[in-house]
Image (cartoon, rainbow, N blue to C red):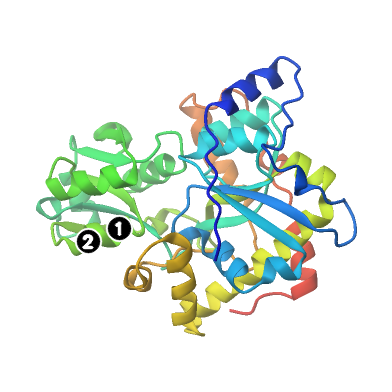
Amino acid sequence: MRVRLTRLIAPFVAVLFLAACGGSGGGSSGTAASGGSAGGNEPYTVRFGSVGGLTDAGLYIAQSRGYFKQENLTVQFSRMAGGSALTTAIATRNLDVAGIAVTAGMFNAVDQGLGLRIVGDKQSVRPGVAATHFVAQQKYIGASVADTLHNLRGKTVAITDKTSASAPILDWLLNKYGMSLSDVNLRALGYPEITASLLNGSLDAAVELEPFLSQALASGHVVDVSDQTEVLPATGATTVPLVYSSSFIADHKSAAQRFMVAYMKGVRDYNDAMFKNVKKQQIVSVIAQGSGQPEAVVDKAHPAGLDPNQQVSVKFLGQLEDWFQKIGSVKNHVDPSTIVDDSFAKFAVDKLGQFKP
């Protein structure tokens, strides 16, 4: 697989400033060949961005198995540091598609009129299926989850972003056992820093994501406390949605539909492999190559949820938005139903049929 890594940095700030001041802000960051049309099967280069990692599995598989090529699409992959950069890139038309964690910034961007729409699922959790787990140092582990959490009162706990879905989900877990985020010393660290800090003992507990999760657990000093699905909808909850730019939808609808068809095929192959053991080793190899991780790491990792029908719960997004608004991270109420466009997922399901577990 040939993955082209593009670094999009400071220019976003300038473009966003120009957009706010009435400038076009609509450059294609050097990909004029992206072309295409709103109808037919014209070739199109789709600019996709994410932080990378194992949860891009659906993309890796669709690329490797030629599903994008079948739809006359070329996908250009970009890796960025986090949700803020990705949201800016989508809003300023420097990306067509992105996997962006649900954050307060996403709701604020929509409130400010920056064009983006949630169209599907790039990472979700459901009972028994979660690539993110809450872990703690061995010395704090009690006889139950409740005991462990109470042992962490006043201790240092890390998540990657205090304005992402990780914060309310952890808060809800603590709430279930009579605590809240105010009962711990919450820090924001990147996953590599979280893992290193857990291993050297300077961090007491954290929310970890694969493959860092397995690395921490393998040390023997860190213990899995909860996958946190006990406080999430049983039907599943999308924490990192697949997002389209409004210009991609408006100007290249056919390409947007075809992208979803190809991506959904990749996601379904992933589900077949991980949960039905259908050609699992082949899929593990593809994910390892795409993510740059050893096959052994991918094989042992807790699999992420990727919805095979690309359904996104508007109700769950509403719960996240409500939490962000209550703590003041989101100033104005944003109706989640105005952010979600499920027409592309429906188009792909109409073409491929409903996935059968």
| Quadrant that contains the C terminus | bottom right
Q: Nearer the viewer, residue 270 or 124?
A: 270
Residue 94: give x, y in percent of width and height: 66, 37
The answer to whether mark 2 and mark 1 are in CB contact below 8 A is: yes
Seen in the picture, residue 202 relative to 341 is either above or below; the reply is: above
- Secondary structure at badge 2 equals helix
- Residue 341 visible in the displayed image: yes
Q: Does 249 sit left or right of 90 as displayed?
A: right
Three-letter amino acid code at the position of disc 1: Leu
Task: Point out which mark residue 90 bears.
Answer: none
Q: Does 324 sit left or right of 206 as displayed?
A: right
Find disc 2 in the rendering and name its residue. 217
Seen in the picture, residue 66 relative to 97 is either above or below; the reply is: below
Residue 129: give x, y in percent of width and height: 43, 66
- Residue 267 visible in the displayed image: no
The residue most toward the right is 39
Find disc 1 in the rendering and name its residue. 213
Residue 98: give x, y in percent of width and height: 60, 47
Seen in the picture, residue 289 relative to 316 is either above or below; the reply is: below
Three-letter amino acid code at the position of disc 2: Leu
Q: CA distance from mark 2 to mark 1?
A: 6 Å
Q: Residue at x 49, y 24 (%)?
A: 328
